[in-house]
Image (tube, rainbow, N blue to C red):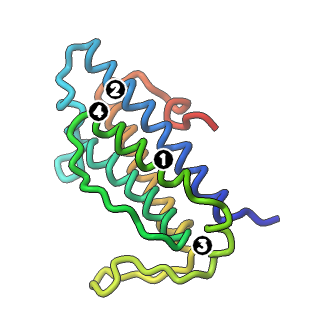
Amino acid sequence: MTISLYAASVPVFQQMLNSLSALLNKAEAHATAKQIAPDALLHSRLFPDMFPLVRQVQIAADFARGVSARLAGVEVPKFEDNEQTFADLQALLAKSLAFIGELSSAQIDGQEQREIITRPGTPKEKRFTGQAYLLSYGLPQFFFHVTTAYALLRHNGLDVGKRDYMGTY
């Protein structure tokens, strides 16, 4: 039995971006209820050399869009990643979900052997097949940043658990 490249990508990104959106809603409500300045959560880090929450969300959204676009053979939408508030992050997630929601299985399925080159022409250039790009690079990167965003919120007192992380499936 085989699984389609589309089924292993877009629906997974949609589930977890929606989960991230719900987590951010809870975080904003938590900050309001506890009279915590939103920036205290948005700029929190697990360790000084790690990106803050706002950047974790941006990168997760970037990976969802970028991986999906490259698999579909369409241009990767570029966003400025200048979000500063919960509302800004929610808008980013909504735009990202809208973009990947427009991609069809016909665009992605069958692209397992497509060559995908990341950071072309730079010392960090990497070449992948479509399948390897998704399974060995794109999904692990995406989940790292979603998980780190979850961990930052949990670490800062948000009452969430695995069900919140998983979202609706």
Amino acid found under the numbered disc labelled 1: Leu
Residue 128, how many percent across, how many down? 50, 80
Residue that lies at the very extreme toward the bottom in this rendered image: 121
Left/right placement of residue 11 relative to residue 97 reads: right
Sequence-first tag of 4 and 2:
2
Contact (CB < 8 A) between labels 1 and 4? no
Contact (CB < 8 A) between labels 4 and 2? yes
Sequence-first tag of 1 and 2:
2
Q: Which residue is mark 2?
A: 27
| Quadrant, the N terminus | bottom right
Amino acid found under the numbered disc labelled 2: Ala
Q: CA distance from mark 4 to mark 2?
A: 9 Å
Q: Which residue is mark 1?
A: 97
Q: Does dot 2 land on a helix, a strand or a loop?
A: helix
Q: Which mark is residue 86?
A: 4
Q: CA distance from mark 3 to mark 4?
A: 34 Å
The relative height of residue 33 versus residue 5 in the rendered view (above or below) is above
Amino acid found under the numbered disc labelled 4: Phe
Q: Does dot 1 land on a helix, a strand or a loop?
A: helix
Q: Which mark is residue 143?
A: none
Amino acid found under the numbered disc labelled 3: Gln
Q: CA distance from mark 2 to mark 3?
A: 35 Å
Residue 26, how many percent across, how many down? 39, 24
Q: CA distance from mark 1 to mark 2?
A: 20 Å
Q: Which residue is mark 3?
A: 131
Sequence-first tag of 2 and 3:
2
Q: Residue at x 30, y 87 (%)?
A: 121
Left/right placement of residue 105 relative to residue 125 reads: right
| Quadrant, the C terminus | top right
Classify mark 3: residues with Cα within 10 Å, few (<14), some (14-19) or many (20+).
many
The mark lying in front, picked from 1 and 4, is 1
